[in-house]
Amino acid sequence: MTFSTGIYSFPSSMHVNDFNGDGYIDIVVANQGNYNIGVLLGKGDGNFGTQITTMTGPPNIVIQIAVGDYNGDGKMDVAGVCGESSFSLYPTPTFVIVFVGYGNGSFGQQMIFSTELVSLDYVLANDFNGDGRLDLAIGSSNGGNFGIVLNTCACC
């Protein structure tokens, strides 16, 4: 079985979770070529519906994603390391964007967080400081560094 993410979408990262609360596994994809993240809602039988997309830019291209409930509302959100594109599919990722989930497979309310790191390659979610909110670990293979973005805001 194959499922389309669109012509010239160039998927760069994927995760699974239940994005619409129906108990079935859904797939979220970072489509850097089409400047979006897409969710394919699972039907519970190994098949998925048509992709629901949320625009990330231009100029923002999401390279890697991490899934979690960042604002504590019980709905899955998506965080991504991003770069600004100058009509290139390979921007230098230097910031993090959180897309707040609506609970139906779509997202909105983008929140942008600057970082001190450049050329970000990785993002992982966990509660690193024990406050009950998901934080983000971001990493760069260019220079061998990583950092933690603490979730300190009430909104996420």
Image: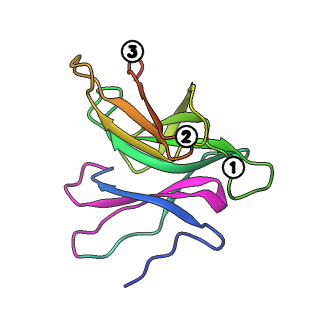
Marks 1 and 3 sit apart, C-alpha to C-alpha, by 28 Å
- The residue shown at (59%, 71%) is 6
Quarter of the image for residue 123 reads: top left
Residue at the bottom extreme, as displayed = 1
Quarter of the image for residue 94 reads: top right
Pointer 2 residue: 143
Q: Position of residue 130 (x, y in %)?
A: 21, 19
- The residue shown at (31%, 50%) is 20
Residue type, label 1: Pro
Pointer 1 residue: 91
Instruction: Work out whether mark 2 precedes mark 3 in sequence or the reverse, and give the earlier one.
Output: 2
Instruction: Work out whether mark 1 precedes mark 2 in sequence or the reverse, and give the earlier one.
Output: 1
- Which mark is in front, 1 or 3? 1
Crowding at mark 2 (Cα within 10 Å: few <14, some 14-19, many 20+): few
Q: Position of residue 147 (x, y in %)?
A: 44, 29
Residue type, label 2: Gly
- The residue shown at (52%, 61%) is 12
Give the magenta-colored segment's residue range. 20-45
- Which mark is in front, 1 or 2? 2
Disc number placed over residue 152 in the picture, else none: 3
Q: Is residue 40 covered in magenta?
A: yes
Q: Is residue 25 covered in magenta?
A: yes
- Local SS, label 1: loop
